[in-house]
Amino acid sequence: MSQNEPKVEILKDIPRKEEFQKYLEKAGVIDQLTKLLVSLYENPDRPENALDYIRNFLGASLGQNDDSKELQGRIAELEQQNKEKDDEIAQLKQQLASQNKEDDANKDENDANQE
């Protein structure tokens, strides 16, 4: 019966392993590791220290998400400011156009009075 015991132990671990694999997939770990390994494989210049390369890659990926959120916020802020400036420019152009019309009307009136 001792021969069957290792097989039973292995069979007991299968659901646990599947659960762990699902957890890693859901957390995005498998995707990140795949991207990391592909990047390392496709890199023509093999880094001297693969562990440093891995740390930098994962650190850059993590920092990139934080930077991305910050940059998206900054973009939204700048787009709002740009819209406000565009609205202000349009308003000033209208004011200038109406003022020019008034000046032209006053000039025509003055010219007619001088004749």
Image (cartoon, grey):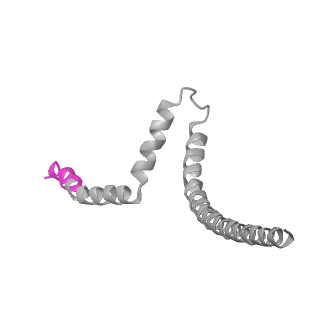
In the rendered structure, the answer to whether residue 111 lies left or right of residue 2 reads right
Of 83 and 19, which appears nearest the observer? 83
Residue nearest the observer in this picture, 76 or 47: 76
Q: Residue at 57% of width from left, 62% of height from top?
A: 69
Residue 25, by quadrant, is bottom left
Camera-nearest residue between 63 and 86: 86
Q: Residue at x 55, y 57 (%)?
A: 65
Q: Residue at x 41, y 49 (%)?
A: 31
Image location (x, y in percent) of residue 99: 74, 71
| Helix, strand or loop: magenta stretch | helix
| Image x and y of residue 5, in percent | 18, 54
Q: Is residue 20 left or right of residue 99?
A: left
In the figure, residue 97 lies in which quadrant? bottom right
* Above-or-below relation of 107 to 10: below
Q: Is residue 4 magenta?
A: yes
Is residue 22 found left or right of 36 in the rendered image?
A: left
Residue 99 position (above or below residue 61): below
Quadrant the C terminus occupies: bottom right
The answer to whether residue 95 is above or below residue 40 is: below
Farthest left residue in view: 1
The residue shown at (58%, 40%) is: 53
Using the image as rendered, state which of residue 114 and residue 78 is in the foreground: 114
In this view, which residue lies farthest toward the right?
114
Report the span colored magenta: 1-10
